[in-house]
Amino acid sequence: MCSSDLLELAIGIAKVGIDALHKAVNAIRAARRDLDAKPAAAPAKVRELDARLTAIEEALMQVNMKGSEADLAFPGMLNEQYATFAVSLEDGDTLPTRPQQDLYASLHEKLEAQLALWRTLNNGPLAALGEGSESRSAPSR
């Protein structure tokens, strides 16, 4: 048994996955607040950017959950998938299985795709409007 492999997987989930996801969601929400506070010189552009921010946020986190039983009505998004996967590893005392490693790789790939969209938006159109910010940059691996 090599518990260091399980530990590495758990650290990857917590640090690379869940932490990066939450930082990105917080940055997206900050960008949206900044957009809302800015006088809309180009309202169509602001609406389009808001829609793109919303699409990324909704892929990362279920934004419709408002109560403890909302997970019965709305699908779990990446944050819930990461959290559920992390819990499933807690009672394991063996090497991560191939399916566990594959699931982690799949979740990480989906997360990286959304983070790339966020980076592109933050460094491109948001920056052009004066709303891009290094403090809101998407976490990297």
Image (spheres, helix red, strand yellow):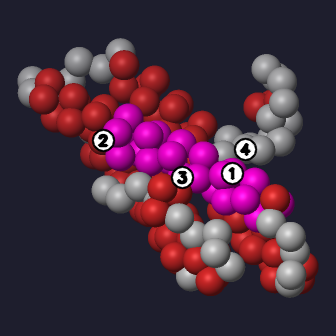
- Under circle 1, the secondary element is helix
Q: In this rendering, would 139 be left or right of 4? A: right
User: Label 2 belongs to which residue?
Assistant: 12
Label whose residue precedes the other's in the sequence (2 or 1): 2
SS label for mark 4: loop
Position of 9 with respect to 13 (left or right) is left
Kindly identify which residue carries mark 3.
Answer: 24
Q: Amino acid at mark 3?
A: Ala
Residue 131 horizontal/vertical position (percent): 64, 69
Cα distance, mark 4 to mark 1? 14 Å
Q: What is the magenta segment's predominant secondary structure?
A: helix
Labels 2, 3: front one? 3
Q: Nearer the viewer, mark 4 or mark 3?
A: 3
Residue under numbered circle 4:
62
Instruction: For mark 2, give the secondary structure.
Output: helix
Asked whether 34 or 91 is in front, the reply is: 34
